[in-house]
């Protein structure tokens, strides 16, 4: 009788422990990657940050720096912009040809010095595993951060 209880207890423990272990390991790896990117910008203090779906948005309101880290792709990418060189920020939405569903969202940063705009990709339905399910959240976050960036120009 005691052997069965111990075996069932061990099986339940393993079933519960293994997913928690891998989730914590994944989160610590993600956190380490984000910290490593932040360390590349020693002169900036990114106090205001927000993350969603393995994307991290950060802004330094004093030194005027904007950082976007995308951990969704095979090769993690980050985009940094010195906001002292930017005069305006807006969103660029790309929809599919046959419907109004959004396929791509990008930040368009207008430079003060030249006419070339800096385009920072934020969301692509092809890169996202859950597709259109998260487009609304990403669109709302992007709109929020456009206003945050424009406030700090």
Image: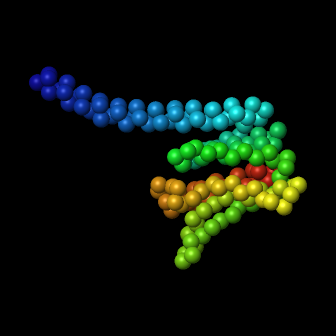
Quarter of the image where one finds residue 107: bottom right
Q: Is residue 71 above or below residue 16?
A: below
Left or right position of 82 against 23: right
* Residue 96 appears in the rendering: yes
Position of residue 109 measured from the top left corner of the image (x, y, whole percent): 77, 56
Question: Observer-nearest residue: 62 or 94?
Answer: 94
Which residue is at a point 77% across and 35% down the rendered structure image? 44
Q: Which is more toward the observer, 136 or 55?
A: 55
| Residue 144 at least partly seen | no
Q: Position of residue 141 (x, y in %)?
A: 64, 54
Query: Residue at image x 44%, y 36%?
Result: 23
Q: How many marks?
A: 0
Q: Quadrant of the N terminus?
A: top left
Give coordinates of residue 149: x percent, y percent. 77, 51
Task: Please state the horizontal and vertical placement of residue 125, each as a whole percent of the image.
Answer: 53, 60
Looking at this view, name the residue that lies furthest to the left.
Answer: 1
Visual colour scheme: rainbow
Residue occupying the point 47% across, 56% down: 130
Q: Is residue 53 above or below residue 20?
A: below
The residue located at (41%, 35%) in the rendering is 22
Q: Residue furthest bottom?
A: 98
Quadrant hosting residue 60: top right
**Residue extending furthest toward the top:** 2
């Amino acid at each position: 009788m005691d052997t069965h209880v111990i075996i069932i207890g061990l099986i339940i423990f393993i079933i519960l422990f293994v997913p928690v272990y891998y989730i914590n390991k994944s989160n610590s790896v993600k956190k380490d990657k984000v910290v490593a990117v932040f360390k590349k910008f020693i002169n900036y203090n990114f106090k205001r940050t927000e993350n969603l779906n393995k994307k991290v948005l950060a802004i330094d309101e004093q030194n005027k720096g904007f950082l976007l880290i995308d951990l969704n792709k095979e090769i993690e990418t980050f985009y940094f912009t010195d906001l002292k060189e930017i005069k305006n920020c807006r969103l660029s939405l790309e929809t599919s040809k046959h419907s109004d569903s959004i396929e791509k969202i990008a930040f368009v940063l207008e430079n003060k010095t030249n006419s070339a705009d800096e385009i920072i990709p934020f969301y692509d339905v092809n890169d996202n595993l859950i597709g259109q399910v998260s487009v609304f959240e990403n669109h709302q976050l992007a709109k929020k951060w456009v206003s945050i960036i424009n406030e700090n120009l």
